[in-house]
Image: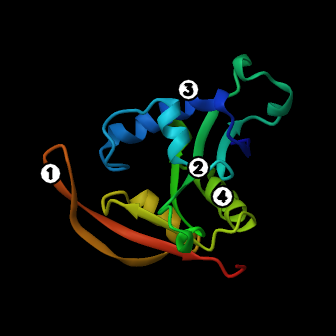
């Protein structure tokens, strides 16, 4: 599958939102149950570490409205507003159902790690449902390690769910 990883632009939001919706629908990607408006999503995520995987090789010369397909996205949100945690961020990686299994998530996370280090992030963390085997495999293959399990940390669809906490400590910062 031919794709490129580029910075996410506001014009990508409809496709990003749709892919996020696919993740919500699985019941194993997030505690969120409703898709946010752009303003809410934008306010919650760092401005400097937002990526999309765009299909094709001629994406730079095509208009967004001209059919550039977003295959996946990745972004970081700060874990705290406290200064001491300025270099710690939580990872989100979502891949469109039709693009899974083609290396899109791997490349998104690889570039996200690189950008995070460029922007002074020393620790990335991810909270993943134990049932989300693909996400666990992706993160572990990208240098994340198990920190622990948060038992019955949140309720989703009337079921208390566990979340596995993984982290990746930069060896460059």
**Who is closer to the viewer here, 109 or 170?**
170
Local SS, label 2 = strand
Q: Residue at x 34, y 33 (%)?
A: 34
Task: Give the residue at mark 1.
Answer: 159
In the picture, which quadrant includes the N terminus? top right
Instruction: Answer above or below: position of 4 versus 55.
Output: below
| Label placed on residue 112 | 4
Local SS, label 4 = helix
Q: CA distance from mark 2 to mark 1?
A: 27 Å
Which residue ends up furthest to the right in the rendered image? 61
Contact, mark 2 vs mark 3 (Cβ under 8 Å): no
Task: Give the residue at mark 2.
Answer: 74
- Upstream in sequence: badge 1 or badge 3: 3
Q: Quadrant of residue 151?
A: bottom left
Which residue ends up furthest to the top in the rendered image? 66
Q: Position of residue 131 (x, y in %)?
A: 30, 58
**Residue 52 vs residue 157: left or right?**
right
Contact, mark 1 vs mark 3 (Cβ under 8 Å): no
- Residue 30, can we see it? yes
Local SS, label 1 = strand
Q: CA distance from mark 1 to mark 4?
A: 32 Å
Q: Position of residue 94 (x, y in %)?
A: 51, 46
Please tell me how crowded label 2 is: few (under 14), some (14-19), or many (20+) other residues with Cα within 10 Å. Answer: many
Task: Give the residue at mark 3.
Answer: 14
In the picture, which quadrant includes the C terminus? bottom right
């Amino acid at each position: 599958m031919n794709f490129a990883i580029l910075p996410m632009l506001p014009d990508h939001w409809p496709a990003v939102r749709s892919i996020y919706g696919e993740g919500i629908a699985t019941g194993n990607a997030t505690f969120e149950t409703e898709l946010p408006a752009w303003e809410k999503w934008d306010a919650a995520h760092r401005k400097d570490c937002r990526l999309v995987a765009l299909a094709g090789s001629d994406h730079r010369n095509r208009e967004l409205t001209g059919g550039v397909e977003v295959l996946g996205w990745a972004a970081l949100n700060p874990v705290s507003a406290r200064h001491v945690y300025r270099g710690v961020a939580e990872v989100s990686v979502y891949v469109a159902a039709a693009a899974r299994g083609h290396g899109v998530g791997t490349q998104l996370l690889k570039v996200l790690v690189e950008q995070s280090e460029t922007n002074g992030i020393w620790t990335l963390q991810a909270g993943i449902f134990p049932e989300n085997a693909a996400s666990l495999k992706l993160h572990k293959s990208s240098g994340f390690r198990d920190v622990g399990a948060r038992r019955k940390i949140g309720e989703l669809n009337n079921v208390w769910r566990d979340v596995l906490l993984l982290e990746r400590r930069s060896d460059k910062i």
